[in-house]
Amino acid sequence: QVQLVESGGGLVQPGGSLRLSCTASGNYISVNTMGWYRQAPGKERELVATHNRFETNIADSVKGRFTISRNKLQNAAYLQMNSLEPEDTAVYYCNYRDRIRDLWGQGTQVTVSS
């Protein structure tokens, strides 16, 4: 089994920053893709950023503001979010995929408001 633990959401003013963390524990496989998706009220879940050893994908809406990074063990993913906008308000979900499983974290709320 693999467990995902997310942290780092919260309330921030426009222009502020937050850092999300997601760690996979248990029988994870180091060759994997980890990343973040988000879902705003009334909208579908959308990709924010994903990363594996071969490529990084970042949504156009957050390019230049958000950065995804990984640790050496490849069992954690971090999303540094700068210059946050009210439109970034959503529940952010961590995703972990390897050759045998596709898992979601519990979600963490990010609210950008003055």
Image (cartoon, helix red, strand yellow):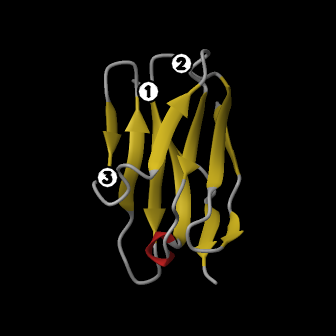
The answer to whether residue 102 is seen in the rendering is no
- For the residue marked with disc 3, what is the amino acid? Ala
- For the residue marked with disc 1, what is the amino acid? Asp
**What residue sits right under mark 3 in the picture?**
59
Q: Nearer the viewer, residue 29 or 71?
A: 71
Mark nearer the N terminus (1 vs 2): 2
Mark nearer the N terminus (2 vs 3): 2
Determine whether label 1 and label 2 are within 8 Å by CB. Answer: yes
Mark nearer the N terminus (1 vs 3): 3
- Label 2 to label 3: alpha-carbon separation: 25 Å
Front disc: 2 or 3? 3
Determine whether label 1 and label 3 are within 8 Å by CB. Answer: no
- For the residue marked with disc 2, what is the amino acid? Ile
Quadrant in the picture for residue 37: bottom left
**What residue sits right under mark 1 in the picture?**
98
Q: Nearer the viewer, residue 59 or 12?
A: 12
Residue at 64% from the left image edge and 56% from the top image edge: 18
Say which mark, if any, is on residue 29.
2
Quadrant in the picture for residue 43: bottom left
Q: Position of residue 15 (x, y in %)?
A: 56, 67
